[in-house]
Amino acid sequence: MKTVQDWVLDIRKEAMSDITPDRAATLLHTLSALLGSVNEMYQRLTGKYEKISQARANAKASDEYENKLKMEALVSVVQELINSMKYVIKNKLQEQREVSY
């Protein structure tokens, strides 16, 4: 079963190739759905991290904090990919319009 990170990596690789506006729109749709999942995962990890008591913080904080940082980075990557897909769609459609004239 693919993880969210696997999905993002696959989309990221595909986004670096020459894709059509339709494919970019499909990837944008997928990324938007993934962003919801990533945000849920981030909220859960944040909640877990914040619930650690001070007495146990030294034992657990490093792993929980590292996971939280990884999830923050993943949120950022997904958001940037969404912005990139929007840009690709806009440019590809503009190219098609220019060719039509």
Image (tube, grey):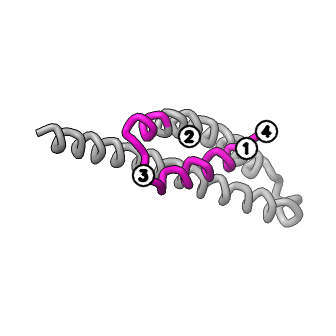
Precedes in sequence: disc 3 or disc 2? 3
Looking at the rendered image, the quarter that the C terminus falls into is: top left
Front: mark 1 or 4:
4
Front: mark 2 or 4:
4
Residue, disc 4: 1
| Residue 32 vertical position relative to residue 52 in the rendered view, above or below | above
Q: Residues within 10 Å of mark 1 (few under 14, many from 20)?
A: few
Please report the residue visible at 61 percent of the width from the left and 49 percent of the height from the top.
10
Precedes in sequence: disc 2 or disc 4? 4
Type of residue at label 1? Thr
Please report the residue visible at 30 percent of the width from the left and 44 percent of the height from the top.
92
Please report the residue visible at 56 percent of the width from the left and 55 percent of the height from the top.
13
Task: Tell me the chief SS of the magenta region.
Answer: helix
The part of the chain drawn in magenta is: 1-26
Please report the residue visible at 33 percent of the width from the left and 48 percent of the height from the top.
87
Front: mark 3 or 4:
3
Q: Quadrant of residue 86?
A: top left
Residue, disc 1: 3
Precedes in sequence: disc 3 or disc 1? 1
Is the residue under label 4 in contact with that under label 1 (CB below 8 Å)? yes
Residue, disc 2: 35
Q: CA distance from mark 3 to mark 2?
A: 23 Å
Front: mark 3 or 1:
3
Residue, disc 3: 18
Is the residue under label 4 in contact with that under label 2 (CB below 8 Å)? no
Precedes in sequence: disc 3 or disc 4? 4
Side of 53 where 9 appears, left or right: left
Measured from the top left, where is residue 45 in percent x and y? 72, 47
